[in-house]
Image (cartoon, grey):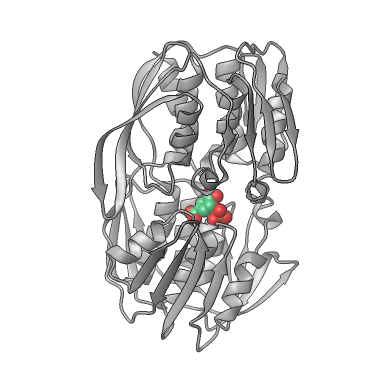
């Protein structure tokens, strides 16, 4: 039987000059929904990302007794106040593929009156949850799991927190889960957190949740206090820089092409990808910069690059580019010289072991790599033209492996068969539609 869930690509993309819109930011969409569910009253969002990770967030909230109305244009969440969930007996929440959902919602469940079970798909069930169980236990919640993996049972505490916590992985999910748990505690939770995306901090400031952030060179001290009532939050979700990264790289690696990507969230804790690509010689500009509820938003202008150079990527940019490395590696493959990306053990903690998959894709194209547990050296070849058959499959349906492979196929050539097309539903359902729009130049 014909497998409709794979695509074949066997020609390079032709020069293009386009303006595109990308879907809403995933981190902000999930955070908005979870916070709206804890507010008292109706919150409304536009440009909410309607991908599986976000739809699973809405489903979990409905299971917890929250009313939600989702239309093409808008999402409305009828919050029932801090800790206002319906903790029925034997609840099961399915987080699907989303680490952000599973980890952040656990933060809100440290108060649950009954046992709640969190489950997820094959990829999520391989990922580490001790990183979240350990700090959340300090709030008084109890957990049952096998080796810190899903399925996990959480038993809430009647008198949670506050706690002191050191977050040393640069994980925004761990930091945010603890900040969520702190919402319903009496007293101040203090987090020493290695720098990572700061959307939760900005939303707390905007919502007037007591928060104090002291910035140090490599970490921040975050002090959060619990509150009794949270106001609803209307939000226009800006578009996702992680999704736009595929189109930045498509343009950089294509011939004589230009692209404008509208309305992107360029929060400084997310723009590592732009800084790294610029270091490699890419032409990228921000235009029409504006601010919205603490977030920085811009249109991004990008053009093809004739000459790219290999870099020794500074590790301090790792957390602000953590979701973009697979596609950044493609630029390193085309660059003059060797590129070195290090201190990246967190990349193997994602939807698939991405250091492994990054080198697998490059090796199949004929690029030499040296990979360790936490680093990759890429021997770039500016003249590389791929003209063989490449098959990408069995990658735990990691959406970013699929999308990076499509970009590689369209810019390096070869005859590619890429399985699990539906993986784009996780974060970027319109990905192939935008590719096809650009192809029709
Ligand atoms: C996210 C944080 C990052 C990132 C993920 C989204 C978030 O994970 O990889 O896609 O929204 O907080 P870690 O916090 O595990 O680094």
Percent from the top left, x then y, of residue 120?
63, 58
For the point 26% across and 55% down, the residue is 293
Percent from the top left, x then y, of residue 190?
47, 75
Percent from the top left, x then y, of residue 217?
46, 57
Is 321 on the left or on the right of 83, as rendered?
A: right
For the point 57% across and 58% down, the residue is 95
Which residue extends farthest bottom?
159
- The quadrant holding residue 168 is bottom right
Q: Does any portion of residue 155 appear in the rendered image?
A: no
User: Which image quadrant: the N terminus?
Assistant: top right
Percent from the top left, x then y, of residue 179?
45, 70
Is 367 on the left or on the right of 333, as rendered?
A: right
User: Which image quadrant: the C terminus?
Assistant: top left
- In terms of depth relative to the viewer, which is nearer, 102 or 331? 331
For the point 58% across and 21% down, the residue is 335
Up/down of 235 relative to 404, above or below: below
Up/down of 228 relative to 421, above or below: below
How many discs appear? 0
Q: Does any portion of residue 166 appear in the rendered image?
A: yes
Is 337 on the left or on the right of 50, as rendered?
A: right
Which residue extends farthest front?
217
Up/down of 252 relative to 236, above or below: above
- In terms of depth relative to the viewer, which is nearer, 206 or 377? 377
- In terms of depth relative to the viewer, which is nearer, 31 or 138? 138
């Amino acid at each position: 039987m014909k497998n409709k869930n794979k695509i074949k690509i066997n020609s390079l993309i032709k020069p293009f000059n386009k303006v595109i819109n990308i879907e809403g930011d995933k981190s902000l969409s999930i955070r908005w929904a979870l916070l709206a569910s804890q507010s008292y009253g109706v919150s409304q969002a536009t440009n909410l990302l309607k991908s599986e990770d976000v739809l699973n967030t809405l489903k979990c909230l409905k299971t917890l007794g929250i009313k939600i109305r989702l239309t093409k244009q808008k999402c409305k969440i009828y919050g029932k106040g801090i800790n206002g969930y319906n903790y029925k007996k034997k609840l099961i929440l399915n987080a699907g593929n989303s680490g952000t959902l599973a980890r952040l919602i656990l933060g809100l469940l440290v108060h649950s009156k009954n046992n709640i079970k969190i489950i997820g798909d094959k990829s999520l069930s391989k990922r580490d949850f001790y990183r979240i169980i350990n700090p959340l236990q300090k709030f008084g919640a109890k957990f049952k799991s096998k080796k810190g993996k899903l399925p996990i049972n959480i038993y809430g505490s009647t008198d949670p927190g506050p706690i002191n916590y050191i977050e040393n992985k640069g994980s925004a999910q761990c930091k945010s889960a603890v900040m969520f748990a702190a919402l319903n505690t009496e007293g101040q939770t203090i987090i020493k957190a290695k720098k990572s995306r700061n959307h939760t901090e900005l939303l707390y400031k905007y919502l007037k949740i007591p928060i104090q952030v002291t910035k140090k060179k490599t970490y921040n001290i975050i002090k959060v206090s619990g509150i009794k009532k949270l106001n609803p939050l209307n939000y226009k979700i800006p578009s996702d820089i992680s999704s736009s990264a595929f189109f930045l790289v498509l343009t950089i690696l294509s011939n004589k092409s230009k692209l404008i990507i509208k309305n992107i969230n360029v929060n400084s804790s997310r723009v590592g990808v732009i800084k790294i690509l610029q270091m490699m010689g890419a032409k990228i500009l921000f235009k029409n910069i504006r601010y919205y509820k603490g977030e920085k938003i811009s249109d991004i202008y990008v053009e093809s690059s004739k000459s790219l150079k290999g870099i020794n990527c500074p590790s301090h940019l790792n957390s602000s580019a953590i979701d973009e490395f697979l596609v950044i590696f493609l630029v390193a493959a085309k660059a003059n010289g060797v590129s070195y990306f290090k201190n990246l053990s967190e990349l193997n903690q994602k939807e698939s072991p991405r250091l492994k998959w990054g080198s697998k894709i490059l090796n199949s194209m004929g690029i030499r790599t040296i990979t360790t547990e936490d680093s990759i050296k890429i021997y770039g070849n500016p003249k590389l033209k791929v003209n063989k058959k490449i098959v990408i499959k069995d990658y735990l349906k990691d959406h970013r492996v699929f999308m990076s492979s499509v970009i590689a196929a369209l810019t390096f050539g070869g005859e590619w068969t890429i399985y699990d097309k539906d993986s784009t539903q996780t974060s970027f359902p319109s990905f192939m539609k935008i590719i096809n729009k650009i192809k029709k130049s």
